[in-house]
Image: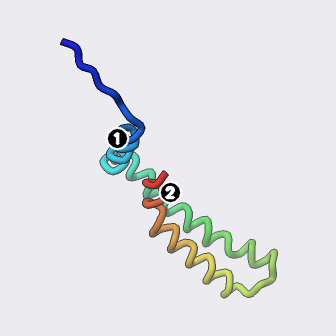
Amino acid sequence: MEIIFKLTEQDFIDFNSYHMKTSKTLKRSILLLRLIGPIVFLIGIYPVYKITKIPLWYWSIIFSVTSILWFIFYPKIIEKD
């Protein structure tokens, strides 16, 4: 008996999406990256403030909003790629 089948690019994409949603290791990795981004943004406030001399509250708002957006949208961006 011979079985013939063809794998398409969409099959690979579907498999990787399924694996990303069910793998504990990948879930942990995504959570870690989801948290590291905002931490880096929030740590980056002070050096940017010192370099530009723009008020600290201004940079705090910008970096905080960026951190929140990163945390919310990072998983969707990963799925899209």
Kindly indicate the quadrant of the structure image that contains residue 23. top left
Residue at left offset 51%, top offset 72%: 69
Q: Is residue 79 left or right of residue 69?
A: left
Q: Amino acid at mark 1?
A: Phe
Kindly indicate the quadrant of the structure image that contains residue 37. bottom right
56 versus 31 height, above or below: below
- The secondary element bearing badge 1 is classed as helix
Front label number (2 vs 1): 1
Q: Which residue is mark 2?
A: 33
Q: Is residue 40 left or right of residue 17?
A: right
Q: Within 10 Å of the Cα at label 2, are there few (<14), some (14-19), or many (20+) other Cα atoms?
A: some
Q: Is residue 34 left or right of residue 26?
A: right
Residue at left offset 61%, top offset 72%: 42
Q: Nearer the viewer, residue 19 or 12?
A: 12
Q: Which residue is mark 1?
A: 15
- Image spot of residue 45 (x, y percent): 68, 75
Residue at left offset 35%, top offset 38%: 11
Q: Amino acid at mark 2?
A: Leu
Q: Nearer the viewer, residue 22 or 2?
A: 2
Q: Within 10 Å of the Cα at label 1, are there few (<14), some (14-19), or many (20+) other Cα atoms?
A: few
Quadrant in which the N terminus appears = top left
- Image spot of residue 47 (x, y percent): 74, 72
Residue furthest to the top in view is: 1
Residue 26 — which label?
Answer: none
Q: Is residue 53 left or right of residue 10?
A: right
